[in-house]
Amino acid sequence: MYGNMMFQPLLISGLIEHAQTYHADTAIILKNTNGTITETTWGDIAQNSKRFANYLKTLNLAASDRVATIAWNNHRHLETWYAVSGSGLICHTINPRLFPEQLSFIINDADDQVLIFDKTFVNLVLSIKDSIPQVKQFICLDAYDADIAQIFPDIQFYDDLIQPQSEQFEWAKLDENSASSLCYTSGTTGNPKGVLYSHRSTVLHSYASCLPDSFCLSANDRVLPVVPMFHVNAWGTPYAAAMVGASLVLPGPMLDGTSLVNLIDDFQVTTALGVPTIWQGLLNAAQTLGSQLSSLKRNVVGGAACPPSMIKTFKEKYQCETIHAWGMTETSPMGVINQLKAKHAQLDDAAQDQLRLSQGRPPYGVQLRLCEQENGTTEIARDGRSVGNLQIKGHWIVDTYFGQDRTALTTDGWFDTGDIATLDQDGYMNIADRSKDLIKSGGEWISSVELENIAIAHPDIDMVAVIAATHLKWDERPVLIAKKSAHGAVTEQDLLDYYHNKIAKWQIPDKVIFVDAIPIGGTGKILKKDLREMYGSVLLETE
Ligand code: ADP
């Protein structure tokens, strides 16, 4: 027997309809590429997305055709998202920082029919245009620009396209399991693979991310997604914000510390989300500018391990709660979030700080387990100590990669994340490392994350990465690559001494290499693969 309740499919169009109906005057603020600020509202975003949906209808695309975007976090980009998914098409967000060959590979793999891009990417798109012949329409996300029109003959301009269109549009009536958007893994560890989200998975993920024990979003918040919309849909914040009617501040391309501090202070941002390298830049800028970041209640840090020293600085200096979270493209991305429980209130500060270092615990909708082998099915203890291959399952977790027939899951239906972690009885998870980054020294494992967390706490250090270098006797040994802060005078020996009494002696890196810059990938993460290529043999040379 079925229950007697209404059935309504969980659709992305429902989110923008809600924002338009109940939060029409809530502000959406954005920084344009030229540095100027535009203020708009959820009401305007909804109207323009309907105008663009009317335009898309004129293209006679087939259901589930892919429409790609190469754009920063801005209002027009947001409008296209809702227009594309709401029309029954698939919004494919592309990372502009990929190499041109990777861009063409992804656009061809996805068979994108329309390409929408920010003005800043005109030359990039021109450079790959001949290698993406199936793209029928090129749309510049801006007002008409005669110079661009001259160098790009068949280009269309977004503002011209939507201007004559009606702001009335009936969203497509879709099965909630229809595909809504497509995002490729950033390829930090291999070839990019497409993850195809559904309307249902996106809406459920939005519900879960707004929960108090998740990102805790509400109509009282002003949210700054520093994480780009092309990086796992800005962690779903543009959907979650519409769901609760939160105000958004979209930073455009300027993700440097000073720009972000100014945005936070000028527009009283309450919640900001980004990867650790972003926060390092922001903390440096806040110190230089003398900002107290007084409106910022919480910042969500994910995408890579959050150093404990960062959590401490945000808490002690800025009274800002740092929420550590873990996820991946394949998990929409929210997998676990670190919020404490009532029973932890009685713990002293040191014990609470210790708990806060974990990546967090799963919200309803996600389950975790550890297995002995990668893609294995033999579970190991959730005792907070045993280390194993982290597997995940849930409503917003990938089943099959785009364009592949074979499921990406284990024989009993779990997704192996490629991360090595511990889990405790409450579900608090600690990532030891990515399986590819672990250092295998003489049969023992050393966590690169743990070594990085120690070094980054040194006051003279700005950024670090620990890699496995090949070693004749031990197979691999840790090498620390470090970038000093502006006036840092620390020496190699100082840094090695800094590890004493913080970690077992045999885990201390064999060498420190100071560099002027550490390579960062398209999503702001340190490119350890590149560092391994550059310095992986350094211990052989010195022997
Ligand atoms: P890519 O795999 O190309 O880097 P993703 O953005 O999907 O692209 O990265 C997911 C991976 O990032 C995870 O599998 C994990 O290794 C790492 N990661 C994400 N969040 C954290 C975190 N809080 N701590 C440590 N590692 C993290």
Image (cartoon, rainbow, N blue to C red):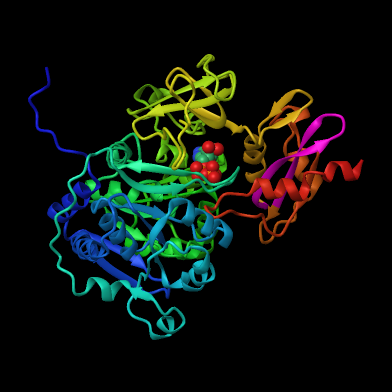
Residue 12 x, y percent position in the rendering: 25, 47
Q: Work out whether residue 513 or residue 193 is closer to the camera in this orientation and state it.
A: 193
Q: Which residues are magenta?
A: 460-482
Residue at the spot 29% in from the left edge and 58% down from the top edge: 61
Q: Quadrant of the N terminus?
A: top left
Residue 402 relative to residue 354: left or right? left
User: Could you tell me what secondary structure mostly forms the magenta stretch?
Assistant: strand
Residue 462 x, y percent position in the rendering: 64, 53
Residue at the spot 41% in from the left edge and 80% down from the top edge: 153
- The quarter of the picture where residue 480 lies is top right
| Residue lying farthest to the left in this orientation | 4
- Vertical order, 310 against 158 (above or below): above
- Vertical order, 412 against 279 (above or below): above
Q: Is residue 465 one of those drawn in magenta?
A: yes
Residue at the spot 29% in from the left edge and 48% down from the top edge: 239
Q: Work out whether residue 269 or residue 386 is closer to the camera in this orientation and state it.
A: 386
Residue at the spot 81% in from the left edge and 31% down from the top edge: 475
Q: Is residue 365 one of those drawn in magenta?
A: no
Res. 134 visible in picture: yes
Q: Quadrant of the C terminus?
A: top right
Res. 458 visible in picture: no
Q: Work out whether residue 129 or residue 15 is closer to the camera in this orientation and state it.
A: 129
Q: Work out whether residue 426 or residue 109 is closer to the camera in this orientation and state it.
A: 109
